[in-house]
Amino acid sequence: MRLLCLEKPRGLAQRLRFAMMRALAGRVPASILALSYQRDLCGKYLAPCYHQGLGRAREWSVGEIEIFAAFVSNLNHCQY
C-alpha cells in the first residue's frame, strides 16, 4: 500500500527527480518515496545510516544487497 501523501513531490528539485524517475522507470520506487517525504525530519539522517550500514557489508556484493532488499520487500508485500 502506498500513501498518497508520499506521491506528491515538494519543491522544484523533487518534482524534477520524480518526473525523471517516472519517465525512466514508470514509477518512483517506494524506498525513495519514503526517504524523500519530509526529508528534514527523517530521510536526510536515515539515508546515510542505511548507506553506511550496507556499505560495510564487505562480504555482500551490491547485487546481493539489492536482492536482499527486494526479498525483504516481497515478504512485507511491498513493491520494490
Image (spheres, grey):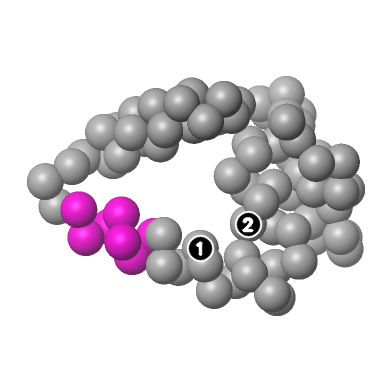
Amino acid type, mark 1:
Ala
- As displayed, is residue 46 above or below residue 77? below
69 and 22: which is toward the camera: 69
| Residue at 18% over, 42% down | 60
| Residue at 30% over, 54% down | 54
Q: What element carries label 2?
A: helix
Q: Where is residue 23 in the image (x, y as percent from the top left)?
A: 76, 29
Is disc 1 surrounded by few (<14), some (14 to 19) or many (20+) residues within 10 Å? some
Q: Where is residue 43 in the image (x, y as percent from the top left)?
A: 61, 65
> Magenta-highlighted stretch: main secondary structure?
helix
Tell me if 25 is positioned left or right of 55 in this view.
Answer: right
Q: Residues at badges 1 and 2 in contact (C-beta under 8 Å)?
A: yes
Tell me if 9 is positioned left or right of 35 in this view.
Answer: right
| Residue at 69% over, 57% down | 36
Quarter the C terminus occupies: top right
Residue topped by disc 2: 35
Amino acid type, mark 2:
Leu
Residue topped by disc 1: 47
Would you identify the image quadrant in which residue 62 lies?
top left
Q: Which residue lies furthest to the front in this view?
A: 76
Would you identify the image quadrant in which residue 72 lies?
top left
Q: Give the range drawn in magenta.
A: 51-57
Q: Is mark 1 on a helix, strand or loop?
A: helix
